[in-house]
Amino acid sequence: MTFLLHRSLSWVRAVTSGLKDRRKLGWAAIFLIGVLSGVIFGISTGMPVSNGFAAPAGEDLRLRGSARTIMALRTPDAVIPAVPDGLMPVQPKIAIVIDDLGLSWEAFRAVNDLPSPVTLSFLPYAGEAQGMIDQVAPGHEVMLHLPMEPLEKTEDAGPGMLKASLSEKALRAQLLENLTSLSGYSGVNNHTGSKFTSDPSAMEVVLSELDQRGLFFLDSITTSRPVAARIGQVRGYDVLERNVFLDHDYEHVSAETVKMQLAELEAIARADGYAIGIGHPYKATAEALSEWMGTADVRGFEVVVVRDLLPPEPPQTLASR
């Protein structure tokens, strides 16, 4: 700053020595005052200075899920936070889904008693499913675990499985049979479905029907070529995707292996703002989840149900009614 003032005063002396008209001298003084005022304002407001002149400040905005992170504005001497007043960091959210429910009361009670919100997904063909849904603990969420066609012929999705080869009329009829078998759920996720969920035409039928009923779709991601999220983005359907399977290898599942998967889920949530994990009603899974939920808030995570991760509904206006 001292160097800048010294250089400016030298420039004034040089200019005034060649000026004989007082009017010109006055205009030169005004010009100098304007330049110095701009420099002093730029420094006082934290704008980076280049070659003695204040440069426009910028901000680096990064969107991760629903979290809006504003990077700090770096200057040669300091890091100045650029977070607007009232904007607090968004707490990472984690949703846990338990699939394959409705077949065992013992398995249902083990996950229904979990201390934090959890999303319970019931098979539509399970005879006891509706009775369990009617007893779901407050704070939990219910989904329909919809059977869909797998690539492997040896996999059994169960009765009422949706096949990609069905005509649109037959597919809608089979879908409606599944959807009307249970009540009290807010969304749907696929049971198996590695073949069906990679078929754009078949998934368009399902997603359009769910949208008409106000239901969201959670893609369990059982294939490397899922299409639901892309269709949802184009059509405006509510579609989410699973991030981590907590206990996919059921033959070797243990509390320790589930904890390792939960650690991976936490890492994704920290990076993206939210994450979704899918597990099953195994004893080891329920034990690991109960312990993990007891300390999740201490580690900075909010445990939510899946519907809490959907984007908020746009506010209604007179024009939209």
Image: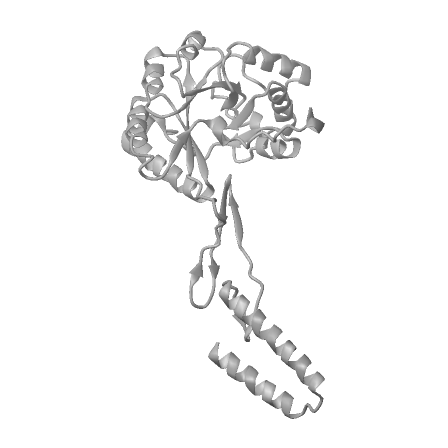
Colour mapping: one colour
Viewer-side residue, 211 vs 151: 211
> Vertically, is 37 above or below 161?
below
- Residue 116 in the image: state x and y as whole percent: 35, 26
Q: Does residue 1 appear to the left or right of 204 in the view shown?
A: left
Q: Quadrant of residue 319?
A: top right
The quarter of the picture where the C terminus appears is: top right
> Vertically, is 27 above or below 203?
below
Instruction: Report the residue at 61% width, 90% height from top.
Output: 14
Q: Does residue 24 appear to the left or right of 222 in the view shown?
A: right
> Vertically, is 140 above or below 125?
below
- Residue 187 in the image: state x and y as whole percent: 52, 21
Viewer-side residue, 76 vs 94: 76
Viewer-side residue, 1 vs 243: 1
Instruction: Report the residue at 57% width, 71% height from top.
Output: 37
Viewer-side residue, 204 vs 16: 16
Instruction: Report the residue at 57% width, 18% height from top.
Output: 162
- Residue 92 in the image: state x and y as whole percent: 42, 38
Instruction: Report the residue at 53% width, 51% height from top.
Output: 61
- Residue 236 in the image: state x and y as whole percent: 63, 31
Q: Does residue 88 appear to the left or right of 20 in the view shown?
A: left
| Total numbered labels placed on residues in the image | 0
Q: Quadrant of residue 42?
A: bottom right
